[in-house]
Image (tube, rainbow, N blue to C red):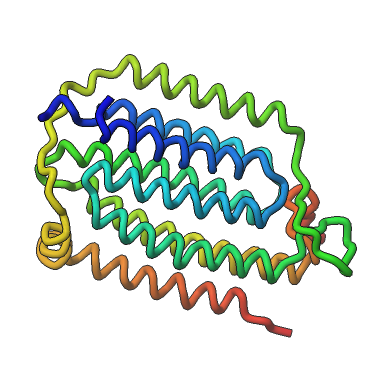
């Protein structure tokens, strides 16, 4: 029975792929909302690692930490989108390459 | 090739393929749709890792909450950075593609290299049953304090974000 299980390494490879894609979105895109999506991808890759390791843990601590990570991710997203909207009101665009501080 | 493995490969293809679409496309609405597919695939991966509670809450929070927030963000802002306020054509600007994708590829290769050197032992699945009652009991007994704290944190974040997004003149 146990031989049929998916190896842990495959989960870790999938998470590594997601993390790499999220990081390259973070440095490739110039739109602020795209950058936030990249951050979400990286957060979810970390969460997938936690869940995959928690599969072999009798106390399931990774699963519980993953639930808290989910809540923190939602909070981050809400605050960041509010900041994006406020920045759009200030500058009339959300292009990260064109933001300049007014001095 | 067991059915479990086949479904795992299909879910990984959905997840990473949609993430690549998110990386490749310039249209921000297409990226939001691809993010929806990514979150569906991730929830399937959580089910295959025997974390059904996490899969359901991930679907509810990301597809029901975060994606709607992102769509509101897209609709409330103008993606056209040329200052043309008449039309919002949803196609965004980006830097040169080659260098960031090479950096991402290098990160992926480095992570795979490090993971290949690690020794994670055999697979001893602790408990392939549903984790629902376990999560409920431990959130209210052992992890009650962090649970309350994260509730307060959520309240602070929501109040703060409504205050930040307030239209003040």
Quadrant showing the C terminus of chain A: bottom right
Query: In the image, is residue B47 above or below residue B111?
Result: below
Q: Would residue B30 appear left or right of A18 to someone viewing this image?
A: right
Query: In the image, is residue B127 above or below residue B111?
Result: below
Total marks placed: 0
In this view, the residue farthest toward the top is B117
Rendering quarter of residue B140: bottom left
User: Residue at image x 33%, y 32%?
Assistant: B6
Q: Position of residue A74 (x, y in %)?
A: 44, 62
Q: Which residue is at the front of the view, B95 or A11?
A: A11
Q: Position of residue B4 (x, y in %)?
A: 26, 35
- Residue B91 in view, yes or no: yes
Q: Which residue is at the front of the view, A62 or B42?
A: B42
User: Residue at image x 23%, y 45%?
Assistant: A62
Quadrant showing the N terminus of chain A: top left
Q: Position of residue B166 (x, y in %)?
A: 62, 80
User: Residue at image x 67%, y 39%?
Assistant: A28
Q: Position of residue A29 (x, y in %)?
A: 69, 44
Q: Would residue B74 appear left or right of B119 to someone viewing this image?
A: right
User: Residue at image x 32%, y 61%?
Assistant: B57
Q: Which residue is at the front of the view, A77 or B43?
A: B43
Query: In the image, is residue B109 above or below residue A72?
Result: above
Q: Would residue B61 appear left or right of B20 to someone viewing this image?
A: left
- Residue A22 in view, yes or no: no
């Amino acid at each position: 029975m146990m031989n049929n299980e998916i190896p842990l390494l495959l989960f870790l490879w999938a998470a590594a792929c997601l993390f790499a894609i999220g990081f390259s979105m973070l440095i490739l895109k110039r739109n602020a909302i795209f950058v936030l999506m990249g951050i979400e991808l990286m957060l979810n890759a970390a969460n997938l690692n936690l869940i995959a390791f928690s599969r072999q843990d009798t106390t399931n601590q990774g699963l519980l930490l993953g639930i808290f990570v989910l809540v923190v991710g939602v909070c981050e997203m809400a605050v960041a989108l509010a900041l994006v909207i406020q920045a759009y009101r200030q500058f009339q665009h959300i292009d990260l390459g064109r933001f300049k501080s007014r001095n | 090739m067991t059915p479990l493995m086949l479904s795992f490969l299909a879910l990984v293809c959905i997840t990473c393929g949609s993430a690549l679409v998110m990386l490749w496309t310039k249209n921000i609405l297409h990226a939001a749709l691809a993010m929806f597919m990514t979150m569906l695939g991730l929830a399937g991966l959580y089910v295959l890792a025997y974390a059904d509670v996490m899969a359901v809450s991930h679907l509810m929070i990301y597809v029901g909450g975060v994606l709607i927030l992102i769509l509101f963000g897209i609709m409330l802002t103008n993606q056209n950075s040329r200052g043309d306020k008449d039309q919002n054509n949803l196609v965004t600007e980006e830097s040169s593609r080659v260098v960031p994708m090479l950096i991402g590829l290098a990160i992926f290769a480095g992570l795979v290299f490090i993971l290949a050197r690690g020794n994670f032992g055999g697979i001893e699945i602790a408990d392939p049953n549903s984790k629902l009652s376990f999560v409920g009991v431990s959130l209210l007994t052992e992890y009650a304090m962090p649970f309350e704290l994260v509730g307060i944190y959520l309240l602070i974040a929501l109040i703060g974000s409504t205050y930040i997004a307030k239209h003040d003149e």
